[in-house]
Image (spheres, rainbow, N blue to C red):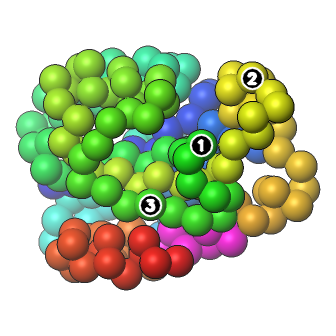
Amino acid sequence: MKLIVGLGNPGKEYENTRHNAGFKFIDKYAKSQNIEINKEKFGGIYNTFSYNGEKIILLKPQKYINLSGEVIIKYLEFFKININDLLIICDDLDTELGKIKIKYKGSSGGHNGLKNIEYHLHTNEYKRIKIGISNDKNKSTVDYVIGKMPKDQLEKLEKITDLSEQIINDYLNINFDNLMNKYNKL
C-alpha cells in the first residue's frame, strides 16, 4: 500500500496560492484517474484506488500546511503504511517556477509543512516531489507563498501539474532512482 500526499492549505481563500501546489498536483492526478477525493478521516480528505493490484491512497490534509504531519502520521499508523511507501508533493521556494525536484530525503528547506512531517515521522528520509514556485525576495516568505498567483505564473504551474499522471504512474511503476533521473532534468 502507498500513501501519496499533496500539501496545501484548505479553504477557498488559499486556492491558486503557491503553497497549494501539492493540492493542485494531486487534484490533477485524481481527475486523470476519475477519482474523487471526498472521503474524510483523521483531518484529511482522501480516496483509494488500485494500481497494478496495489492499494494507493491519495490524501490532502485539511489542517493548515504547517500541521500536515499530524494528519499524515495517523494515516501511516492506521493503514500500517511503511515510510518507504510515502510520497509527499509540495511547493519549493528554492526551485524555479514550473520545474520539479524529486528526492529521497533531505532537509525541510524551511518549509513548515515538511518540518511538521519530519517532527511526526522522526526522520527526513521520505520520498518527495518538490514543485518549484521560485522566490520573490522582495516579499515576506509568508505573503509570497500564500499570495494569489498571477495568471502567467498559474499557467507555468499548470504545465507541471499536467505531468502529474505521467509522474505518479512512473512513481508507481519504476525504480525511484530512475524516476529522479527522468524528471530532475526537466
Q: Secondary structure at mark 1?
A: loop
Q: Which residue in the protein does label 3 denote?
A: 101
Q: Which mark is residue 37?
A: none
The residue located at (75%, 65%) in the rendering is 156
In the image, residue 43 above or below residue 106: above
Q: Quadrant of residue 54?
A: bottom left
Left or right relative to 49: residue 113: right
Asked if residue 122 lies in the magenta stretch, the reply is: no
- Quadrant of the image for the N terminus? bottom left
Q: Which mark is residue 93?
A: 1
What amino acid type is highlighted by mark number 2? Ser
Q: Confirm or deny contact between disc 2 and disc 3 (CB under 8 A).
A: no
Q: Quadrant of residue 75?
A: top left
Say which label, 1 or 3, has the lower sequence index.
1
The residue located at (81%, 57%) in the rendering is 153
Q: Which residue in the protein does label 2 denote?
A: 140
Front residue of this view, candidates 97 and 176 = 97
The residue located at (17%, 30%) in the rendering is 123
**Spatial distance from mark 1 to mark 3, Cα to Cα?**
11 Å
Q: Which residues are magenta?
A: 158-165
